[in-house]
Amino acid sequence: QVQLVESGGGLVQAGGSLRLSCAASGSIFSIAAMGWYRQAPGKQREAVATITRGGSTNYADSVKGRFTISRDNAKNTVYLQMNSLKPEDTAVYYCNTSPQLRSGYWGQGTQVTVSS
């Protein structure tokens, strides 16, 4: 059974940092590229960063140089280190496979709020 559990969000001032974690069930983590996505109020969900099983990464232009995605294959966990946060980074952050699961499954997400 697929399970994705995100954590680490919170309220932070602009310029601050947060580290998100996502625990994924082993059945998908062991074979999948993983990604972090976010959805701001009134906007569509967008991909923020992706990482292959081998560690190759890709980032949305809006977060390049500020966010870092990583994974621990032994722990079935993917991380998103977010530095120099901006108010426009405020959103619910989700992890999923990359591309996302065909089943349409999403975890509960974790809220990130950046105050100005």
Image (cartoon, rainbow, N blue to C red):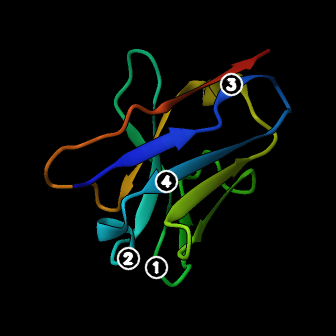
- The Cα–Cα distance between marks 1 and 3, rounded to whole angstroms, is 28 Å
- Of labels 4 and 1, earlier in sequence is 4
Kindly check if marks 1 and 3 are in contact, taking CB atoms under 8 A apart as contact.
Answer: no
Q: According to the image, label 2 marks what residue?
A: 30
Q: In this view, does 5 lie to the left or right of 116?
A: left
Observer-nearest residue: 99 or 88?
A: 99
Q: Where is residue 69 in the image (x, y as percent from the top left)?
A: 62, 61
Q: Which quarter of the rendering shows the C terminus?
A: top right
Task: Please name the residue shown 47% across and 23% down the image.
Answer: 40
SS label for mark 3: strand
The amino acid type, in three-letter code, at marker 2 is: Ser
The amino acid type, in three-letter code, at marker 3 is: Gly
Kindly check if marks 2 and 1 are in contact, taking CB atoms under 8 A apart as contact.
Answer: yes
Q: Where is residue 75 in the image (x, y as percent from the top left)?
A: 55, 68
- The Cα–Cα distance between marks 2 and 1, rounded to whole angstroms, is 8 Å
Q: According to the image, label 1 marks what residue?
A: 53
Q: According to the image, label 3 marks what residue?
A: 10
The amino acid type, in three-letter code, at marker 4 is: Ala
Q: How crowded is mark 4: few (under 14 residues within 10 Å), some or many (20 or more)?
A: some
- Of labels 2 and 1, earlier in sequence is 2
- Of labels 1 and 3, earlier in sequence is 3
Q: How crowded is mark 2: few (under 14 residues within 10 Å), some or many (20 or more)?
A: few
Q: Determine whether 26 is above or below 12 in the image.
A: below
Q: In this view, does 26 lie to the left or right of 10?
A: left
**Given the current orientation, which residue lies at the most extreme left position?**
103
Task: Please name the residue shown 60% across and 24% down the image.
Answer: 90
Give the number of marks.
4
The amino acid type, in three-letter code, at marker 1 is: Arg
SS label for mark 2: loop
